[in-house]
Image (cartoon, grey):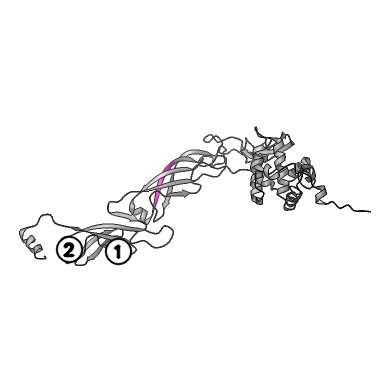
Amino acid sequence: MYSTHYSPLTTHLPMSKDYYKILDIDKSASQDEIKRSFRKLAHKYHPDKPDGDEAKFKECNEAYQVLSNEQKRQQYDQYGSTFDQQGGFGGGMGWEDFMQKARQGGGGGVNFDFGDLGDLFGGAFGFGGGRKKEKRGDDIQIDLQIEFKDSVFGINQTVELYKSTTCPKCKGDGAEEGTPIETCKPCNGQGQIKKVQRTFLGAFETAAQCPDCHGQGKVPKTPCKKCSGSGVSNETERVEIKVPAGIENGSTLRLSQMGNASPHSGTAGDLYVRIFVKADSQYERVGNDIIKEETISFKKAALGDKIDVKTLDGEIELKIPAGTQPNTKFRLKSKGVSYLHGSGRGDLYIQIKVDVPTKLSKEQKKALESFE
C-alpha cells in the first residue's frame, strides 16, 4: 500500500478558461454579484430562445458551479482549473447529472436556487411554470373635485361608475339560473392542462392554465345569457369614496378591489381617485395652516376695536388692539387643516389689511395733521 503526494508546482496546468471573464465579473465579486451575473447570462444564452447559445449557456453554468462554491473558488484561484478537472458542473457532475438534479429540484453539486430561475426554464422542471397565476381585473382611475372646506374636514362622496362588475343575473358563477356547474372535462377538474415539451435537454412535462375553465376546474353546463359565462357584466355602480380630512390637492386615493371585476372569479382591480381641491378666494392653505385676510378701517387700526370674522368653524369675534399695523397676523390655534396622518389641526392666521381713505374732508385732514 502506498500513497502519492502531488505538489502544486508539478501538477499546475495553465488555466484554459477564465471563469471570471466568462461571467463578466471581477475577481473580488461577491456571491450575490456572481449569482446576478449568472442569472443574466443564463437568460441571454438559454437554448430555447431564438438567439440562445447552448455552448455558452453550458460554459456559464460551468463557471458558476465553481465560483459559487467557496471551497472550489479558492482552489480555482490558487491553482487554476480546466473543465475536465472540475467535472464540469461541480463535484464530478456532467451535463446529464446536472439536468437530473435540475429535474429533482436542485441539491447535490448544483449550487444555485432553481426556484429563482423558474422563468428561465419556462417551468420545464417544475420551478414555477405550472404555478397558478391569480387573475385580476383592470384598475380604474377617476378625478374627483371637492370644496376647500371638504379637504379640511373630510367628506364621503358617492360617484356613479360604469364598470365591469359581478353579473347580477348569475351572481358571478357564469351559469344560467337553475342550471348546474360541471367538472371541466379537458382538464378533469384540475384547472391545468399538462403537455410534453421537447427541448434539446429532452422531453419535459409542463402545465398551463386550462383555456376551457380558465383555471377553475369547473364550467357551467349552460352559460349565463347576460355575461356569456364570464361571470361579469358592465353595469352602472354607485361607489362611496371616503375622502380623509387634511387631504391635499393632487393626492390620489386607492380603493382596493373597487376597480373592474375579473372574469371567471378572479380578483377585482383597484380604483384610483385623484383629488382636486377647488381654490377658495377667502382662504389660503400653507401646510396645515390657513391664512385669511381681513380688511379694517384706518380708525379701527389706530384706536382698536372688535370685528366679526367668518372661519371654517363658524363666526368668531376678534379683538383688534389699538395701533395695529398693516399685515399684522393674529393666530387662532387649532382652527386650520386637520393632520392627514395624525390627530389635531393646524392654525388659522388672520392677516390684517388697513383701508387707507383716499378722500378726506378738511376737518379729517386737520385732525390727521395734528398728529404731526
Is the C terminus in the top left, top right, bottom left or bottom right quadrant?
Answer: bottom left
Q: Residue furthest right?
A: 1
Q: Is residue 207 left or right of residue 321?
A: right
Q: Position of residue 187 (x, y in %)?
A: 68, 37
Q: Quadrant of residue 231?
A: top right
Q: Answer whether residue 189 is visible to the viewer in this image.
A: no
Residue type pointed to by label 1 = Arg
Question: Considering only order in the chain, which callout, 1 or 2, is on the residue closer to the N terminus?
Answer: 2
Out of 200 and 1, give the one closest to the viewer.
1
Residue type pointed to by label 2 = Lys
Q: Is residue 69 left or right of residue 147?
A: right
Tag on residue 249?
none
Q: Does the residue at mark 2 contact the one at mark 1 (Cβ under 8 Å)? A: no
Out of 259 and 24, give the one closest to the viewer.
24
Q: Secondary structure at mark 1?
A: strand
User: Is 125 a magenta residue?
Assistant: no
Magenta span covers which residues? 156-161
Q: Which residue is mark 2?
A: 300
Q: Position of residue 139 (x, y in %)?
A: 49, 43
Q: Residues within 10 Å of mark 1 (few under 14, many from 20)?
A: some
Give above or below for 108 relative to 366: above
Q: Secondary structure at mark 2?
A: helix
Tag on residue 331?
1
